[in-house]
């Protein structure tokens, strides 16, 4: 297994697509097993055979159907039972079903390695290291101001070519952006993902990847013990929050790397709050403070709107959390607690 993790809008999908173009690797759609499908504190609990089948069906549906809109997962019952029937009932837990699925999917598509690209898995690195002892983790980090600019525009993906994104997903994406919240979440992801003492976790800066893709992808391939192939760099130009998808275009571009600084980018108050909230980790990740971040009338306005935006985001995202309190503790109480 290869897990690509990191804060949202940090290049996790791009890295997964790059690795998925290798001959031995298939990249999955975002699975969201931890947190959305199963609370992390319940992954080791024994579950019934019927619950295991339902979980396996949902895992298949996430790969074979549209990620945003899953319908009729029961159509996969026979396939799920064929995998689960030989397993002793006492060995059925959510994490064992997840592992069975990943191995089954790799065999199904004819590769050795699955690449799981769910960004929020950065908060579940301990569980991954424990339950997937042969796995490698790529932790993607991107300038939080670029992340904020991309997140601010993510709701537009529905109009830029995102396949099947619903109106609800568009509103939910809009709700997730606020400079204070985005800066805080980025800083928490950096705290959770940086593992200088681990030989199985490698941190890659998005800016380094797009500036020198040959060197960085070679390093990643060496780390994951897979062969580098130049064709891996020919990924489709899709997924940006700043323009329409161009699936016929291929390659890794650095053209939007500093869009947050340009006219129409982040305001001085947005930069102020992101740098204030994420300042400690900016230097840790190798990013410099921008002089454009300064106090203004909007700084106070952003502070006043913060609790309301957080509440709205919480309401719209509750359905994506198996256990609300567990998720909040994991995100804001320390991912390694």
Image (spheres, rainbow, N blue to C red):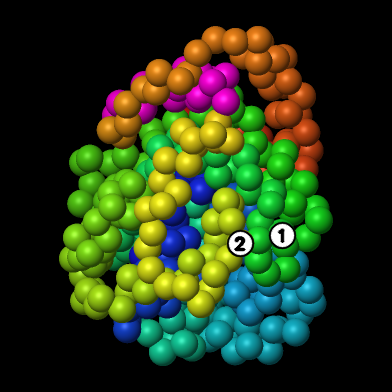
Residue 50 in the image, given as x and y percentages of width and height: 71, 73
Residue 244 screen position, x and y as percent: 61, 62
Q: Is the magenta region chiefly helix, strand or loop? A: helix
Q: Quadrant of the C terminus?
A: top left
Residue 149 horizontal side relative to residue 236, left or right: right
Where in the figure is residue 199, as x and y percent of width and height? Answer: 20, 51
User: Most extreme residue toward the front, as rendered?
Assistant: 263
**Residue at 21% over, 70% down:** 225
Which residue position is annotated with label 2? 244
Q: Viewer-proximal residue, 274 or 321?
A: 274
Tell me: 266 left or right of 134.
right
- Quarter where residue 93 is shown: bottom right
Are discs 1 and 2 less than 8 Å apart at CB?
yes
Q: Nearer the viewer, residue 161 or 53?
A: 161
Q: Residues within 10 Å of mark 1 (few under 14, many from 20)?
A: some
- In x, y percent, where is residue 335? 46, 36
Using the image, determine if residue 305 lies above or below residue 285. Answer: above
Q: How many marks?
A: 2
Q: Is residue 269 magenta?
A: yes
- Assess whether residue 133 is covered by the magenta stretch: no
Tell me the magenta residue range: 267-284
Task: Please state which of residues 148 and 189 is positioned toward the viewer in this rendering.
Answer: 148
Q: Tell me which corner region of the image, top left, top right, bottom left or bottom right, holds residue 315.
A: top right
Q: Secondary structure at mark 2?
A: loop
The residue tagged 1 is 159
């Amino acid at each position: 297994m290869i897990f690509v993790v990191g804060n949202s809008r940090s290049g996790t999908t791009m890295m997964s697509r790059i690795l998925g173009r290798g001959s031995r690797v298939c990249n999955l759609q975002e699975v969201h097993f931890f947190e959305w499908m199963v609370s992390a504190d319940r992954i080791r609990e024994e579950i019934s055979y019927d619950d295991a089948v339902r979980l396996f069906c949902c895992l298949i549906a996430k790969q074979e159907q549209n990620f945003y809109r899953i319908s009729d997962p029961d159509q996969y019952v026979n396939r799920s039972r064929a995998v689960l029937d030989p397993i002793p009932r006492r060995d059925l837990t959510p994490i064992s079903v997840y592992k069975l699925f990943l191995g089954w999917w790799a065999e199904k598509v004819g590769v050795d390695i699955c690449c799981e690209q769910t960004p929020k898995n950065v908060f579940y690195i301990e569980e991954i290291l424990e339950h997937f002892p042969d796995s490698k983790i790529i932790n993607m980090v991107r300038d939080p101001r670029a992340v904020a600019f991309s997140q601010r525009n993510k709701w537009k993906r529905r109009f830029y070519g995102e396949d099947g994104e619903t109106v609800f997903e568009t509103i939910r994406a809009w709700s997730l952006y606020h400079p204070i919240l985005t800066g805080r979440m980025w800083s928490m992801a950096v705290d959770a993902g940086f593992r200088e003492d681990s030989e199985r976790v490698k941190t890659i800066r998005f800016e380094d990847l797009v500036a020198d893709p040959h060197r960085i992808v070679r390093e990643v391939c060496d780390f994951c013990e897979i062969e580098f192939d130049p064709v891996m760099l020919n990924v489709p130009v899709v997924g940006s929050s700043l323009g329409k998808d161009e699936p016929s275009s291929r390659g890794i571009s650095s053209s939007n790397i500093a869009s947050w600084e340009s006219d129409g980018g982040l305001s001085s108050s947005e930069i102020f709050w992101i740098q204030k909230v994420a300042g400690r980790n900016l230097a840790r990740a190798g990013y410099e403070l921008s002089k454009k971040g300064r106090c203004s009338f909007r700084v106070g306005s952003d502070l006043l709107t913060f609790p309301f935006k957080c509440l709205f985001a919480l309401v719209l995202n509750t359905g994506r959390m198996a256990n609300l309190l567990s998720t909040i503790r994991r995100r804001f109480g320390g991912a390694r607690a």
